[in-house]
Amino acid sequence: MLHGSFSRAGLGSDPAEIQGMLCGMLAGGMALENRGWLNALADFINQGEPFSESVNLQLKELYDDLCQQLLSTDFGLTLLIPDDNAPINERGQALIKWVQGFMLGFGLEQNDLTKCSDDVKEALEDFSEISRMDEEMLEGEESEQALFEVMEYVRISAMLCFNELGKSADEQQSEPKTLH
């Protein structure tokens, strides 16, 4: 759905990469109500040019949906990866783009990994490995199962990062404001 409209708008990135980047920014600690993410996306995927109003609306809808998924208590994050009918390599490439986007977004928001738990550090190391995968996958049940397991790991790990470092509006208001 989004892929076609993003392509028509001339965006070089696909929905998986964009959702991954937004998720990474949120998981890295960006405030949910922060609207600076539109500028960051424009810088990275639109050569710094502002998006058209229709693309802005689609991106805001994607962002709001992502926030709801991350805040839900049922681990409801859905990665924007082509469905099971798409060729396995297309889905695998979309997952890699999602992870690359996540790593970029996370890095924009979080540069002090000393605050992170060992689980988050391990997930980020694994994401780094996943982002560099480039071998073709063979069609078949074994490859399907492997891809499903990696997708599920990425989904759960992204939520783990958000649950540890992400900030809801309530948390930000309750944080003490200290001056140094």
Image (spheres, rainbow, N blue to C red):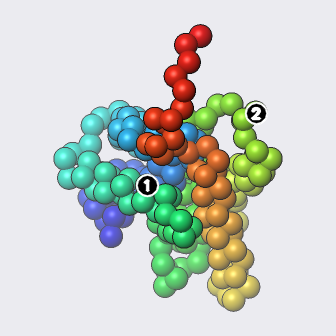
> Residue at the location (64% across, 47% down)?
164
Residue 91 location (% of width, % of height): 55, 72
Question: In the drawing, does residue 152 fall left or right of residue 50?
Answer: right
Type of residue at label 2? Answer: Thr
The quarter of the image holding the N terminus is bottom left
Label 2 environment density (alpha carbons within 10 Å; few <14, some 14–19, many ≥20): few
Q: Amino acid at mark 1?
A: Cys
Residue 24's x, y, as percent? 55, 47
Q: Dividing the image into 4 quarters, which one contains the C terminus? A: top right
- Count the labels in the image: 2
User: In front: 2, or 63?
Assistant: 63
Residue on which the image places disc 1? 67
Residue depicted at x 54% and y 57%: 98
Up/down of 58 relative to 30, above or below: below
Q: What's the residue at 70%, 74% (across, down)?
A: 149
What is the x, y in percent for residue 78?
50, 68
**Which mark is on residue 140?**
none
Q: Is residue 17 visible?
A: no
Seen in the image, is 92 located left or right of residue 11? Answer: right
- Determine the secondary structure under disc 1: helix
Give the number of the disc on residue 114.
2
Farthest bottom residue in view:
141
Question: In terms of secondary structure, where does tag 2 sit?
Answer: helix
Is 141 on the left-hand or right-hand side of 29?
right
Q: Nearer the viewer, residue 79 or 31?
A: 31
